[in-house]
Amino acid sequence: MDEKVAFEAVYTTFNQGRLALIKSLFDSEGIFYYVANEDAASAAFGAVNGTMTFMVAKDQVDLAKDLLKELSE
């Protein structure tokens, strides 16, 4: 039986550079995630609601938040 993965939002941005940096960080740490609204935000460059949200597997949320905290320090 396939098990469904639950996700939780951990970070929202409209900045493409920040998006790339966080994706690289999460990939290097093996964090299971996806970016909600990534394609729409790219297509709507300059739009008011061009935000993208990192959705992380619930069992990795604490690690993801710790990495984001270190990134902002």
Image (cartoon, rainbow, N blue to C red):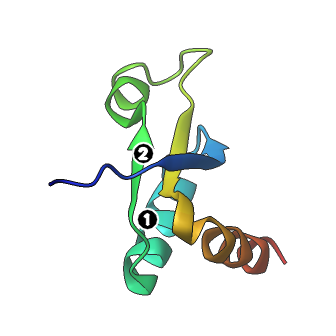
From this view, report whether residue 50 is shown above or below residue 52: above
Q: Secondary structure at mark 2?
A: strand
Q: Residue furthest front?
A: 1
Q: Residue at x 40, y 84 (%)?
A: 28
Task: Tell me the number on the disc at residue 69.
Answer: none
Tell me where residue 11 appears, x and y as whole percent.
65, 50
Mark 2 Cα-neighbour bin, 10 Å: few <14, some 14–19, many ≥20: some
The residue where tag 1 is placed is 23
**Residue 20 image-quadrant placement:** bottom left
Amino acid carrying mark 2 in the image: Val
Amino acid carrying mark 1 in the image: Lys
Q: Quadrant of the C terminus?
A: bottom right
Tell me where residue 33 appears, x and y as whole percent.
41, 58
From this view, report whether residue 26 is shown above or below residue 7: below
Q: Secondary structure at mark 1?
A: helix
Q: Residue at x 43, y 28 (%)?
A: 41
Tally the marks. Answer: 2
> Which sits in the foreground, 34 or 52?
34
Q: Residue at x 62, y 15 (%)?
A: 48
From this view, report whether residue 69 is shown above or below residue 42: below
Tell me where residue 54 appears, x and y as whole percent.
52, 49
The residue where tag 2 is placed is 35
Give how far apart the Cα atoms at labels 1 and 2 are. 9 Å
**Residue 37 image-quadrant placement:** top left
Mark nearer the N terminus (1 vs 2): 1
Tell me where residue 61 appears, x and y as whole percent.
62, 65
Q: Residue furthest top?
A: 48
